[in-house]
Image: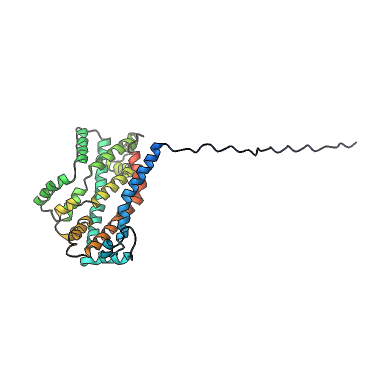
Amino acid sequence: MSATTTPEAAPAAPVTSARTTPPGPRRVPPPGRILLVASLAVATVYFLLPVYWLVIAATKSTDKIYGSNGFWFDSPRLLENIGKVLSYDGHVYLYWVANTLLYAGVGALLATLLAAAAGFALAKYRFRGREAVFKSVLAGVLLPHTALALPLYLLFNKVGLTNTYWAVLIPSVVSPFGVYLCRIFAESSVDDTLLEAARVDGAREGRIFFGLALRIMSPALVTVFLFQFVGIWNNYFLPLVMLSDDRMYPITLGLTTWQTSQDRIPELVQYTVGGAFLSVIPLAVAMLVLQRYWRTGLTEGSVKG
């Protein structure tokens, strides 16, 4: 007798309901958020509108700057205008660019290194008068740079350094804010046990600082470098007091001399606008490249690890 098997019935597919959940009421953002977004939009327009005008004006001739719509192109000739800016008065603008890169680049680099060393020492070494030194640094943060220009001029004139590159470069290597930021960051990020382990392994203090501490403090150092670079790049009053040779001027002071001569030489209106446009480009590039380090440095240095 042969056994026969009956196949089991397949399980029934689940029945899905054709009904859909009715959409709920539209969520309205709170008034505070709307006000915040509106304020940020107004601030964005406020800061970007002059830059937009500068880009448009850099493409126009001198007569078109005053005789056309300031917020739209009219016979653009940007490359021609830039060529005239760079070649005017024996390529003096190129001297100004080189001087500004020297003052801002070398000054910001040395200021960052000095601030890192001072901040690390104030954070990790115990010595008499440490807090007094730090309070003096904080006082320097509150002191405006213009108040120091005249005393610095008298000092540099006494030693014969006025109208030299040193007269602008030496004051640029001091950054009280950089010392403050580096100390706060070193206290929270550089672990004391790590330093002790390096000393036990035979590392000297110089090797610990350059090989270990600087790497850990790199976000703060990038922040200090960026702030100092922008500050020196836009510095006007100190070079005005210290320098008399126009071949040593930075861009800010050089463009001011062009602006004051526009009544005698009308084409300097366009050259000043074109020079200002070119001077913004390095700052924009630096901000775009270093902004992620900048944000990290501002947040990590203020949080206790």
Q: Nearer the viewer, residue 64 or 261?
A: 64
- Percent x, y of residue 168: 18, 52
For the rendered model, the colour scheme is: rainbow
105, above or below 197, in the image: below
Q: Is residue 281 visible?
A: no
Q: Is residue 280 visible?
A: yes
- Percent x, y of residue 221: 30, 45
Q: Residue at x 70, y 38 (%)?
A: 13
**Image position of 291 (left or right of 92):** right
83, above or below 36, in the image: below
Q: Residue at x 31, y 46 (%)?
A: 222
- Percent x, y of residue 50: 30, 53
- Percent x, y of residue 69: 31, 60
**Image position of 293 (left or right of 257):** right
Q: Nearer the viewer, residue 58 or 282?
A: 58
Quarter of the image where the N terminus is located: top right
How many marks the image carries: the answer is 0
Q: Residue furthest left?
A: 158
**Quadrant hosting residue 282:** bottom left
**Image position of 201 (left or right of 231):** right
97, above or below 178, in the image: below
**Image position of 252 (left or right of 25):** left
Quarter of the image where the C terminus is located: top left
Q: Nearer the viewer, residue 52 or 283?
A: 52
